[in-house]
Amino acid sequence: MVVTDSRIRSGDKSEVHDEPHIRGSRVTVQHIHARVEGRGLRPETVAERLNLPVADVSEALANYHRNPEEMREIETHRKAVADESETLEKPD
């Protein structure tokens, strides 16, 4: 049996918004999920557009689904930051 290191860098070791991302890139697991499952793009298309191996896109999607609680926390944090930013940008 061949064991390979994961290409996904965990959020606690990530320098990319404290989110899991593909090692050697700034592409987050959340970004891959949004393109494939949110927009309905094929994994091959996403890989080509981001200059990544299809295997990395597949691994990112698997990571997303293996860690639903972490992904919900990331989504909640992103929404809170966006809401705060929107509030700060509104004129009085």
Image (tube, rainbow, N blue to C red):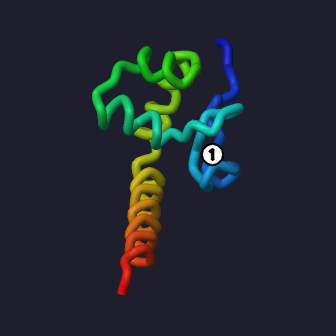
Vertical arrangement, residue 20 with respect to residue 44, above or below: below
Q: Quadrant of the N terminus?
A: top right
Q: Quadrant of the C terminus?
A: bottom left
Name the residue type under label 1.
Answer: Ser
| Residue pictured at 36% horizontal, 29% vertical | 36
Vertical arrangement, residue 77 with respect to residue 66, above or below: below
- Count of all numbered marks drawn on residues in the image: 1
Q: SS at mark 1?
A: loop
Q: In the image, is 34 to the left or to the right of 67?
A: left
Q: Position of residue 65 (x, y in %)?
A: 40, 39
Vertical arrangement, residue 19 with respect to residue 37, above or below: below
Q: Position of residue 71 (x, y in %)?
A: 44, 51
Vertical arrangement, residue 25 with respect to residue 17, above or below: above
| Residue pictured at 49% horizontal, 37% vertical | 63
The residue that mark 1 highlights is 10
Packing grade of label 1 (10 A; few <14, some 14-19, many >=20) is some
Q: Position of residue 5 (x, y in %)?
A: 69, 27
| Residue pictured at 63% horizontal, 39% vertical | 26
- Nearest the camera: 70 or 39? 39
- Nearest the camera: 90 or 28? 90
Q: In the image, is 8 to the left or to the right of 74?
A: right
| Residue pictured at 65% horizontal, 40% vertical | 9
Residue occupying the far top of the picture: 1
Residue occupying the far front of the picture: 91
Q: Position of residue 3 (x, y in %)?
A: 67, 20
Q: In the image, is 40 to the left or to the right of 87?
A: left
